[in-house]
């Protein structure tokens, strides 16, 4: 049932509910043996994830990140795997993104006050904890204040891209982000392409991103149906992208949530990713299983 690999998961260092160590434990219990922690625009959870991985001899951990990017009218998320997450230029860039997230979240809280749905900045900070603040933390504060009954409702009424409390933030374009990831030796994968398919320009975007150095696309993602998986596998194959995937586990519940590893990702494309990382000299940045 579960997959041996899950290449897209979040922790408390962004908007996930589990600490990196708890995530590693849960993934391992679920049968995952190759995991990547991919928090939003932050790598600060990786040291904890790597030490937790030491508990398991037969466990591979790939350092990862999920970066938000903008194209006109839409949001594009790019996963970076095998990144050199100690690179000082990269870390400085991520710090600037964190600041921009903070400013944007403050402005969204102000909007909500103006909309008659007041929440306090302190509660948003509480839910964000030590990590990167994001809209899910604002959603949790809205639920707590009784303005909405669920995180999903908070998004559909206020926080989604077209919602009344939405504020944009500094973001790079997807090609720039791919360049940033390649600079730190990472392999770039387009995350959850369904929204982009609906917007109608996925084919041309894929051609542009492939030329910029994209090597993978999520196909086996969270709740994608078998026929969607077929569509995206075909697209990936035509654009010569490795068909990857992940649960995008956040642990916040909701109807679409999948547990770590609860996706039909086959092992062959994951081995292709590992082989490509080896070719590029990036494999050493992963913690590879001792036992095979
Ligand atoms: P941010 O990074 O602050 O723009 O927030 C984006 C995150 O919000 C995504 O990674 C998802 O985890 C979450 N999100 C986006 N849309 C929804 C939704 N409709 N319901 C619940 N969570 C969502
Ligand atoms: Zn998230
Ligand atoms: Fe995402
Ligand atoms: Fe994600």
Image (cartoon, rainbow, N blue to C red):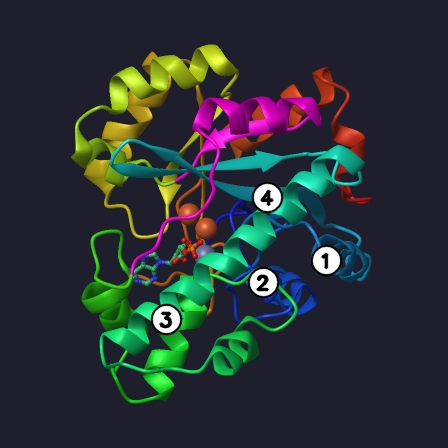
Q: Could you tell me if the residues under marks 2 and 1 are in contact, i.e. CB atoms within 8 Å?
A: yes
Q: Where is residue 249 in the image (x, y as percent from the top left)?
A: 46, 59
Q: Position of residue 193 (x, y in %)?
A: 32, 35
- Residue drawn 36% across the image and 51% down it: 222
Q: Does residue 188 belong to the magenta stretch?
A: yes
Ligand 2 resides in the quarter of the picture at bottom left
Q: Is mark 1 within 8 Å of ligand 4?
A: no
Q: Which mark is residue 49?
A: 1
Q: Which mark is residue 65?
A: 4
Q: Position of residue 189 (x, y in %)?
A: 49, 30
For the residues labelled 4 and 1, the Cα–Cα distance comes to 13 Å
For the residues labelled 3 and 2, the Cα–Cα distance comes to 27 Å
Q: Alpha-carbon neighbours of circle 2 within 10 Å: few (<14), some, or many (≥20)?
A: many
Q: Which of marks 4 and 2 is nearer the N terminus?
A: 2
On screen, residue 60 versus residue 213, left or right, reads right
Q: Position of residue 275 (x, y in %)?
A: 65, 22
For the residues labelled 4 and 2, the Cα–Cα distance comes to 11 Å
Q: State the residue position of label 2.
A: 11
Q: Earlier in the sequence, mark 4 or mark 3?
A: 4
Q: Quadrant of the N terminus?
A: bottom left
């Amino acid at each position: 049932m579960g997959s041996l690999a899950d290449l897209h998961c979040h922790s408390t260092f962004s908007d996930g509910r589990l600490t990196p160590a708890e995530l590693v434990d849960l993934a391992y219990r679920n049968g995952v043996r190759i995991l990547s922690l991919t928090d939003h625009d932050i790598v600060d959870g990786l040291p904890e994830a790597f030490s937790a991985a030491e508990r398991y001899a037969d466990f591979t951990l790939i350092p990862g990140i999920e970066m938000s990017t903008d194209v006109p009218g839409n949001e594009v998320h790019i996963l970076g795997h095998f990144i050199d997450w100690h690179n000082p230029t990269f870390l400085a860039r991520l710090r600037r993104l964190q600041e921009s997230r903070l400013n944007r979240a403050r402005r969204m809280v102000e909007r909500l006050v103006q909309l008659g749905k007041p929440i306090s900045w302190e509660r948003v900070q509480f839910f964000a904890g030590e990590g990167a603040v994001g809209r899910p933390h604002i959603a949790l504060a809205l639920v707590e204040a009784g303005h909405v009954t669920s995180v999903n409702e908070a998004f559909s009424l206020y926080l989604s891209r077209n919602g009344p409390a939405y504020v944009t933030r500094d973001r790079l374009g997807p090609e720039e982000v791919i360049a940033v990831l390649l600079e730190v030796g990472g392999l770039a994968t387009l995350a959850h392409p369904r929204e982009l398919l609906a917007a109608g320009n996925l084919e041309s975007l894929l051609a542009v991103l492939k030329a910029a150095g994209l090597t993978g696309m999520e196909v086996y993602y969270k709740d994608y149906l078998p026929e969607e998986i077929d569509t995206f596998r075909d697209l990936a194959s035509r654009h010569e992208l490795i068909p990857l995937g992940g649960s995008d586990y956040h642990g916040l519940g909701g109807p679409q949530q999948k547990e770590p590893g609860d996706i039909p990702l086959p092992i062959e494309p994951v081995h292709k990713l590992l082989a490509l990382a080896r070719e590029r000299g990036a494999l050493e940045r992963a913690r590879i299983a001792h036992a095979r």
